[in-house]
Amino acid sequence: MLALLTRTAHDSYADELARPGVEWLVMEDDGSLTGPDGSGVPWPEARPEVAWGTSDLFREGAPVLAFFRFLVDCPSLRWFQSPAAGYDSAPFRLMVDHGVRVCNAHVNSLPIAEFVLRAVLDEFQGAAEWRRQADVFEWHIHDWREVAGTTWLVVGLGHIGGAVAVRARALGARVVGCRRTPAPDDPADLMVTPDRLGEVIGDADVVVLSAPATAGSRRLVDAGFLAAMKPDSVLVNVGRGSLVDEAALLVALDTGTPAVAVLDVFEHEPLPPDHPFWTHPRVRVTPHNAAGGFGRLRRQADLFDANLDRWLAGRPLEHDVTDAIKEHDR
């Protein structure tokens, strides 16, 4: 069996993932393919059954477009292991249409939750002022806002939103979670369904967006949603850029509601250099990097290792979202 992976993944994990009968097809950084014998392989002659996508694909200079273009055109592919939780983009739909089983990964919840906590603490504590003073050797104290006693609204209480909720509650926050189908063990003090969001937006000191992109969630945060927020609240988007009406957000920020928007995802990525978000004093831009914790790499490898055993044994795969992707398109 031939399995496709990147050069970075191969050099880091191929030895420990070795199985009898499994050979590696490597995509180099320039998008070319190297076969098991070390020779170059033209695309029409490459016939992998399995492909493992890893986080290094999304770094600058990585062959992400070539990798996914190869996957959607590969007639022999039967299973793709993704490194991410989201599966709403076109390549996933095309692979499923071609009979490929697709699995996602819930390995990024921890670093994203830590990112959210850091971002909110940075704003609450006015850390930018401390950094400014250090640059010019000034010494002035200021009071700052505590997380304890605040209310956090987490829109999309799945793996990522749940990890955010657990950590916010540990610091003494009250958490209101929103998801289509609440569960008894959801880590929140109150759960609402999307149709009840309007009842709780105005209570939130922090609004965290961690919902997937669907037809129903597109531009969920519109002018009405923003107008209902607290004037001193913080909006954090680690879900999808399509969740926010960016033009409406700019207008709302200019009026002071919300006070700050921490944005790691955008409608169009990379964010264009002339986009007003870059220079807006109330916007904090990060380059879709909230999941960047080192630990996710080990967790990706462990998941692929376990699923490879399942695949070879003909057992069901963990985090198989093939049917969910089909349902997503209806």
Image: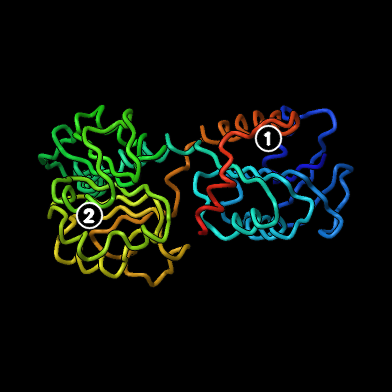
- Under mark 1, the amino acid is Ser
Across and down, in percent, residue 298 comes to: 58, 31
Across and down, in percent, residue 202 comes to: 14, 51
Q: Is residue 19 above or below residue 39?
A: above
Q: Which mark is residue 260?
A: 2
Give the residue drawn at x 74%, y 28%. Answer: 313
Across and down, in percent, residue 104 comes to: 56, 42
Q: Which mark is residue 330?
A: none
Q: Nearer the viewer, residue 242 or 200?
A: 200
Q: Is residue 54 above or below residue 249?
A: above
Query: Real-space Cα distance between discs 2 and 1?
Result: 40 Å
Residue at the bottom extreme of this rendering: 274
Q: The residue tagged with tag 2: helix, strand or loop?
A: strand
Q: Is residue 329 left or right of residue 266?
A: right
Across and down, in percent, residue 7 comes to: 71, 45
Q: Nearer the viewer, residue 27 or 84?
A: 84
Q: The residue tagged with tag 1: helix, strand or loop?
A: helix
In the picture of the structure, the residue carrying the numbered disc 1 is 12
Classed neighbour count for the residue bearing mark 1: other residues with Cα under 10 Å, few (<14), some (14–19), many (≥20) = some
Give the residue drawn at x 65%, y 28%. Answer: 306
Q: How many marks?
A: 2
Q: Is residue 112 above or below residue 230?
A: above
